[in-house]
Image (tube, rainbow, N blue to C red):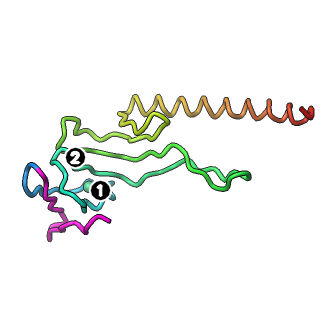
Amino acid sequence: MAPAPRRNPDGSVTVPTLDAGDVRLSCPPWCVFQHGYVDPPAKTDIVHRGEPVWALADVPEHGPVSMVEVGLVQWPYSDRADVYLEITTDDGQLECGPAGSRAVAAALQQHAGHILAMVGQLEEIRGAGR
Ligand SMILES: [Zn+2]
């Protein structure tokens, strides 16, 4: 378990790093990460994370299942310091900007239509007793 972070009176956090000593940072309002690290991170590995959100389905055969985790993420001291959406896919965790995030959302909408079309096929197959 990660230790509690060092909070400063102004609300900022001091993170001891491997390569840059103590780094004092303030979190953006959306960051819910506590910044307590088991091992000191490299400065560029300091990350702000938003609350993760999943698509949830309560499936009769399996109970509640979660899919496609998404949340805001930012490595403020790295060479990609912009804020991204981190989207968990079968290919791993993808950091996407607005265009990439819209592409993922469009693919998921299209896939939902495909699943619904296949439900129709499933009902036909079951109805025919095959
Ligand atoms: Zn943060």
Instruction: Write the residue at 48% across / 37% down.
Output: 89
Q: Residue flagged by tag 2: what amino acid is it?
A: Asp
Query: Principal SS element in the magenta part?
Result: loop
Q: Quadrant of the N terminus?
A: bottom left
- Residue 128 picture location, percent across and down: 92, 32
Q: Residue flagged by tag 1: what amino acid is it?
A: Pro
The answer to if 15 sits in the magenta stretch is yes
**Alpha-carbon neighbours of circle 2 within 10 Å: few (<14), some, or many (≥20)?**
some
Can you say whether 108 is above or below 43 in the image? above
Can you say whether 48 is above or below 121 in the image? below
Instruction: Write the residue at 21% across / 58% down.
Output: 39
- The answer to which quarter of the image holds residue 111 is top right
- Residue 120 picture location, percent across and down: 79, 32
- The answer to which quarter of the image holds residue 82 is top left
**Alpha-carbon neighbours of circle 1 within 10 Å: few (<14), some, or many (≥20)?**
few
User: Dot 1 corresponds to which residue?
Assistant: 29
The answer to if 115 sits in the magenta stretch is no
User: Dot 2 corresponds to which residue?
Assistant: 45
Tell me if 77 is positioned left or right of 60 in this view. Answer: left
- Residue 58 picture location, percent across and down: 66, 53
Instruction: Write the residue at 13% across / 59% down.
Output: 16
Q: Nearer the viewer, mark 1 or mark 2?
A: 2
Residue range of the region highlighted in magenta in the rendering: 1-18
Q: Which mark is residue 7?
A: none
Of 16 and 84, the residue lying toward us: 16
